Amino acid sequence: MPNMKTLGEFIVEKQNDFPHASGDLSSLLGSIKLAAKIVNREINKAGLVDITGAVGSENVQGEEQQKLDLYANDKFKAAMEARDQVCGVASEEEDEAVTFNKDLNRNAKYVILMDPLDGSSNIDVNVSVGTIFSIYRRVSPIGTTPTQEDFLQPGNQQVAAGYVIYGSSTMLVYTTGNGIHGFTYDPSLGVFCLSHESMQIPEDGQIYSINEGNYIRFPQGVKKYIKFCQEDVPADNRPYTSRYIGSLVSDFHRNLLKGGIYMYPSTAMYPNGKLRLLYECNPMAFLMEQAGGIASDGKNRILDIIPTELHQRVPFFVGSTNMVKQVESFIEEYPEQY
Ligand code: AHG
Ligand code: MN
Ligand code: MN
């Protein structure tokens, strides 16, 4: 008999562990669940309806926006606004943070930051994509319009984070700082069912994930680490396997289950790396630490970085503890850039 505990039941059960919990966070996770189902429905028929391809516009970071980027952004934003637990949203697809002006929203205590559609270049070719979210308690007074400070908090202040992977099956994975749990979507029932409780990443892994086409533009330490991964040392299970899907959520999810490392270093083209601290790195770092792994910018813990701007980028190394430590030691030993 499969485990038939639903995401909704699980959230309520966990909330009961905190006798003074107001239920707002549970309700907020409920909004995310709903938006995820809507986006999932659209992605599943992406080849059939006019939803694939570019819109012809660029986001504030100069990246081409896909129709599904904007669709997912709108649906998640609308779900957040409808349920009054969120006073504002910052998104990879919005130039500025969006603040909600209804009184009920202004009285809400949470802000959410999101990458509504991660890996969007994969949509047109039917490869897994995802949604990433990160939730903070606001620091500005309740009842006012949220400010920049609410959104620019270090990752160690997150109260919850998670992702949805729209893959061969759709899953929602989240943490509220008490382990990381995965729920697989049963489309016939329309519910997410608990399938992966308290996931833990192996301390050592044998998979490395990086866009190796950029090798020539990587810092020396990263180049050395890649060569280390490729060495023939059977006693150490090397050479490792290289796997790179090109959507962080999917690469992260596989490495979480099997053990591995995902890397997006600084490159000659992207001196701060490509991934966004607030929408991608912080939530994934929180999840990874909850799974027993680590996340680093090559030198420092991701979750301790003080953000200075909304769309800030940062080099990212995340996964099995011993693998991330190994690449950090190469970066320290070979500090030269490209
Ligand atoms: P997004 O689609 O939200 O812009 O994110 C894409 C990110 C990440 O998901 C992926 O791992 C990485 O960009 C791929 O970048 P490269 O094509 O440079 O490897
Ligand atoms: Mn992304
Ligand atoms: Mn995106």
Image (cartoon, rainbow, N blue to C red):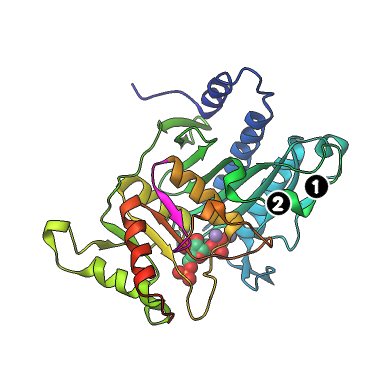
Q: Is residue 295 magenta?
A: yes
Which is nearer the N-term, disc 1 or disc 2? 1
The residue at the point 67 percent across, 71 percent down is 58
Q: Position of residue 310 (x, y in %)?
A: 68, 60
Q: Position of residue 37 (x, y in %)?
A: 57, 40
Confirm whether residue 126 shows in the render.
Answer: yes
Task: Name the secondary structure under disc 2.
Answer: helix
Task: Tell me which amino acid carries mark 1.
Answer: Pro
Q: Are marks 1 and 2 in contact (CB under 8 Å)?
A: yes
User: 97 and 170: which one is in front?
Assistant: 97
Task: Tell me which amino acid carries mark 2.
Answer: Phe
Q: Position of residue 276 (x, y in %)?
A: 58, 61
The residue at the point 53 percent across, 56 percent down is 281
Q: Which residues are magenta?
A: 291-299
Q: In this image, 280 relative to 125: left or right?
A: right
What is the number of callouts on the image? 2
Instruction: Name above or below for residue 313 compared with residue 206.
Output: below
User: Circle 2 is placed at which residue position?
Assistant: 151
> Outermost residue toward the left?
235
User: 274 and 83: which one is in front?
Assistant: 274
Task: Name the secondary structure under disc 1.
Answer: loop
- Dominant SS of magenta comes to loop
User: 183 and 265: which one is in front?
Assistant: 265
CA separation, marks 1 and 2? Answer: 8 Å
Instruction: Name above or below for residue 108 compared with residue 62.
Output: above
The residue at the point 48 percent across, 40 percent down is 173
Disc 1 residue: CB within 8 Å of ligand 3: no
Can you tell which mark lies on residue 287? none
Q: In this image, 216 relative to 240: left or right?
A: right
Residue 207, picture quadrant = bottom left
Please rate how many residues cluster around mark 1, counting C-alpha atoms within 10 Å: few if below 14, some from 14 to 19, many from 20: many
User: Circle 1 is placed at which residue position?
Assistant: 146
